Image (cartoon, rainbow, N blue to C red):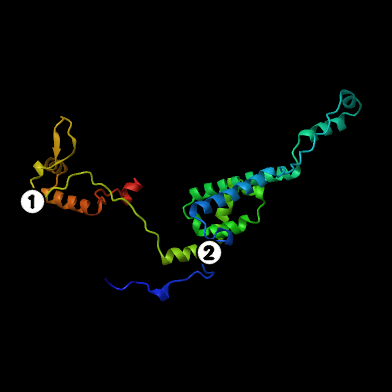
Amino acid sequence: MGSPVFGAVDRVGDPGGGDGLPAELKGKTPAEIAAFYQQRENTLRAELDARPPASVTPPPAPPPQPTNTEFWNDPNASVDRKIAATAVSKAEFERLTTAAQRAMIWAAKSMCKENHKDFHRIEKEIDTIMSRVPEFGQTDPSMWETVYIQAKGFAHDRLAAEDRANPPVMSAEPGNPGSTAPPVAADLYKVTIPGVSKDGTVKSAGRVADMLGITHDAYRKADKELQGDGLLPLTIDNRRGESKRAS
């Protein structure tokens, strides 16, 4: 057998000596030790249950409602007493409105974020300006839109420099020529294109070339250019001469 991984010098002994049990449990069996701790738990639970319940301060009784006679003799004071009996306190009102305002502010800011993809680029400037706006104004989505425009104007130089350093990627879908690209040496009469003629027959590229009055080689060359970049060539000169404009 191989040598053990840990030797005697690697073991950590009990710093207190013995098995670490209190003196009253030394030499006891596991069942006796378990019974001891069970009994102690029962004793502690009984002591807690015997304690009197914590005193709860009852809410103050509402003020008495004004009588009919008091309403008749002093209606203003009677109305004030009736309102005070059911109205919330100033502290409770501020606590409720503060929680509602925070939710409305978050919602207004989120709406502005969704409307502008570059919001994150000027969010620091927007938060700085909005910190000077009262909280009730921050709940208005139009206020965030106004501050967004203002902050973007202030950060124009920085944004322009960032765009010059890292130009945004502009993706555009190439135009669809709308026809089937014929092979270089294919018979154009056997190449069909979308659409049908007036008599219901399928159009062929060769027939279209004949109707346009161009050779099949010219058609292939033009189709190749269209398939390459999707840009239509200039085929009609719609400029008018001086003589036509004068007439």
- Disc 1: which residue: 185
What amino acid type should be assigned to the residue bearing mark 2?
Gly
Residue 91 in view of the camera: yes
Circle 1 residues within 10 Å: few <14, some 14–19, many ≥20: few
Q: Name the quarter where the N terminus is drawn.
A: bottom left
**Residue 241 rendering spot, x and y as whole percentages:** 31, 51
Residue shown at 59%/46% (left/top)? 103
Q: Nearer the N terminus, badge 2 or badge 1?
A: 2
What amino acid type should be assigned to the residue bearing mark 1?
Ala
Q: Is residue 63 left or right of residue 101?
A: right
13 or 149, nearer to the observer: 13
Q: Name the quarter where the C terminus is drawn.
A: top left
Residue 145 in view of the camera: no
Residue shown at 10%/44% (left/top)? 188
In the image, residue 170 above or below residue 136? below
Residue shown at 41%/74% (left/top)? 10
Look at the numbered discs 2 and 1 and tell me whether their residues touch, using CB distance below 8 Å.
no
**Residue 57 rendering spot, x and y as whole percentages:** 76, 41
- Disc 2: which residue: 20
**Residue 12 rendering spot, x and y as whole percentages:** 46, 71
Residue that sits furthest to the right in the current view: 73
Residue shown at 37%/58% (left/top)? 169
10 or 146, nearer to the observer: 10
Q: Is residue 168 left or right of residue 64?
A: left
The image quadrant of residue 213 is top left
164 or 192, nearer to the observer: 164
Circle nearer the viewer, 2 or 1: 2
**In what element is the residue under mark 1?**
loop
Q: Is residue 100 left or right of residue 35?
A: right
Residue that sits furthest to the bottom in the current view: 9
